[in-house]
Amino acid sequence: MKRLISFFVLLLIGFSTNSCAEAEKLLDVPIRFTITEEIPVHINQAVGSQNFQNTVVLSIDNSDTHDYLNKIKEVKIYSLKYKLIQFSGDAACSAEADLSMDNILISSFDENVKRVVDAGTVYNVDNVDDLNKIASKLKSGHKVTAKFGGKAVSENASTNFKVQITMDVKVTANPL
């Protein structure tokens, strides 16, 4: 009889523990949104290659997530992509650059800037390990710094363009 009672007590404890975890899961607040930021790039007219770099901050702190920032359980990145937009300047300008987020190299670029802008080329970041590292940084610090920099040749005129970064993100928080 003692074994039967012990078994029922253990069974009851198991069910109640599982029920609490399930009940807490029901209170999870999933918030999915898109972050879009632009990195402006300016390359002076000069003979030979020259270095350039600029940064922008991408943050998950917005009007929908602000009240939950200290209660985030998970950050998931569904997609991360970038494209070059708003070109003006030397049509022969070529750039060799890297795009990184908090020192995580996510893409390398080595092309004629005007051709890429005119073609509307979109670069997708597909490395799951890199996306998970960025998501982890967003979860802990709520923001990452994106940096686009390298070398470019713009001999005929100064060149300007922007690197537009778009990230589709889901934040899961629990108010408890």
Image (cartoon, rainbow, N blue to C red):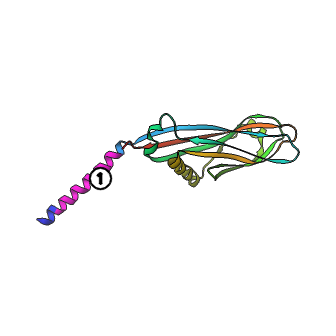
- Direction from residue 154 to residue 149 in the image, left or right: left
The amino acid type of the residue labelled 1 equals Asn
The reply to whether the magenta stretch includes residue 19 is yes
- Say which residue appears at 59% left-offset and 44% top-offset: 80
- Direction from residue 44 to residue 82 in the image, left or right: left
Q: Which residue is mark 1?
A: 18
- Direction from residue 159 to residue 29 in the image, left or right: left
Q: Which residues are magenta?
A: 6-24
Quarter placement of the C terminus: top left
Q: Does residue 3 sit above or below 14 in this rendering?
A: below
Quarter placement of the N terminus: bottom left
- Direction from residue 68 to residue 123 in the image, left or right: right
Q: Residues within 10 Å of mark 1 (few under 14, many from 20)?
A: few
Give the x, y percent position of residue 150: 75, 49
- SS state under label 1: helix
Q: Is residue 65 visible?
A: no
Q: Does residue 142 sit above or below 86 in this rendering?
A: below
Give the x, y percent position of residue 4: 14, 63
Q: Does residue 139 sit above or below 35 in this rendering?
A: below
- Say which residue appears at 29% left-offset and 52% top-offset: 18
Give the x, y percent position of residue 140: 50, 49
Magenta stretch: helix, strand or loop mostly: helix
- Say which residue appears at 61% left-offset and 50% top-offset: 102
The reply to whether the magenta stretch includes residue 32 is no
- Say which residue appears at 85% left-offset and 40% top-offset: 45
